[in-house]
Amino acid sequence: MMYQAWGPAGQTSPIPSVSINLRTALQWTLTRNPTLATLRQDIPVSAAAWALASRFPTSLNPTVSLTLQPWTFVPAPGGGGNFGQTLVNIQWSQPIELPYRTNLRAAIAHASYDQTRFTVLQAELTAMVQTYQLYQTAVYRRDKLTVSRALVDFNDRLVQTLQRQVAATLATPADLVLARVEAQATRQKLEIATHEYVAALSDLRAQIGIPQYATTATPIDEMTLPDATLFSDDDALVRLALTARPEILADQAAVVGAQQAVALARAERWPIPSVGPVAEKDEAGVSYYGFVASVPVPILNAGLPLVRQREAESQRATVALTQTKQRVAAQVLAVLVKWHDAQKVLRETEALVAPVRAETTRMEHLYAAGESDIIKLLQVRLRLLDTDNGWLDALWTVTQNHAELLDAVGVATLLGSLVQNPEAIPAPRQR
């Protein structure tokens, strides 16, 4: 089936579309979004670095040296000289490092791996929340377009009715002019609503990131009120965010890695000795066997500057973690204020919809019975339009605050509140 877009002249134009629900949009974002797909490649790279750090470092491989001097000239007493035997020197050198340094390097790489995983998880949560926001915005713009289109249809019918009444001298030409002006004004609002809906669809399609649906995906779900009971305890939400938000967990992993780097820098202040056997045969044919040992002398650089640098980096990571926690707590509390206020506005706005709609219906009956004029009817219809738009605005604000709150708390289990039906995601259907 084709999606019918409202054209500039009030006519419909067919646009091929693929209808998707919210669960499908979230799944496609999680599995197909190009940014996430690229970011996930950091995980195997970090895992390989962890595996590498856990292995024996190549710098500690043994070294074999061979000195071969096949041309040895021995001076003779009367002058001249003779060629002697070949001089051979073979040496095997093995650096010896205490095992815990490898453990420290592995711990640093493991912390980096955890940091990468939590960073990717944070990006996934943020992307899903953004998809939810963009999906709800597209639905909101679609519903706003529906309201504008309904008003245009009403005004068009009113103009046709007045034309017949003027011809029958039951209405004045001034009433007809007023109705025509109002119809043109509402049609202009329809053009704006259509543009805003197209823009919202474009943002949603770009977020999903699937080329074949970049111009065809359209939402089919209705705007629904999020479950407010999930966010009734402000203090519990702050504690939950401080213990489970991936951004904080990534900073905690960075602190662990920085602390292990300090320990490694302190351990590396102790030089690594090299020992091994040596064998030598001189030009006289005498063979020598023994051991050789060497060790760097930490005089010019004892490693203390590196320790101080690592300690400064550890302090920086600790401060970053503290500031992240403070920022997250402040963000959750600030969004909660918006969330509670949006809930209040929605309740107040929703209470006005039914009475205004009832009074509008009553005014239409009065106008049809000749007991009211067109000016009053148009005024009441405009108030109904304002009320419907106000209710949509309030509901959309609640959904956006809901998304901001989920992003602030950053808990994957709460993402289930984005959709109402926990069943499997259905395949997209054409309409």
Image (tube, helix red, strand yellow):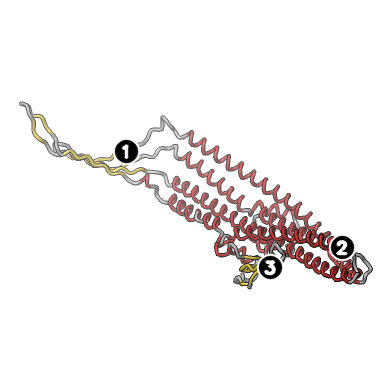
Vertical position of residue 127 compared to residue 320: above or below:
below
The quadrant in which the N terminus is found is: bottom right
Q: Is residue 224 left or right of residue 25?
A: right
Residue at the top extreme of this rendering? 78
Identify the mark nearer the N-term, 2 or 1. 1
Determine contact: label 3, label 1, CB under 8 Å: no
Q: CA distance from mark 3 to mark 1?
A: 89 Å
In the image, what residue type sits under mark 1?
Answer: Ala
Mark 2 vs mark 1: give the one in front.
Answer: 2
Q: Is residue 329 left or right of residue 178?
A: left
Residue linked to disc 2: 380
Query: Number of marks in the image?
Result: 3
Q: Is residue 122 left or right of residue 343?
A: left
Front residue of 358/418: it is 358
From the top left corner, tell me how far across and down residue 40 is, in percent.
Answer: 52, 56
Front residue of 205/320: it is 205
Q: Secondary structure at mark 1?
A: strand
Determine contact: label 2, label 3, CB under 8 Å: no
Is disc 1 surrounded by few (<14), some (14 to 19) or many (20+) residues within 10 Å?
few
Residue linked to disc 1: 293
Q: Is residue 131 left or right of residue 334?
A: left
In the image, what residue type sits under mark 3?
Answer: Thr
Residue at the right extreme of this rendering? 371
Residue at the left extreme of this rendering? 78
Q: Is residue 411 visible?
A: no
Q: Secondary structure at mark 2?
A: helix
Identify the mark nearer the N-term, 2 or 3. 3
Residue at coordinates 57% horizontally, 52% vertically from top-left?
Answer: 119
Mark 2 vs mark 3: give the one in front.
Answer: 3
Q: Residue 12 got which mark? A: 3
In the image, what residue type sits under mark 2?
Answer: Val
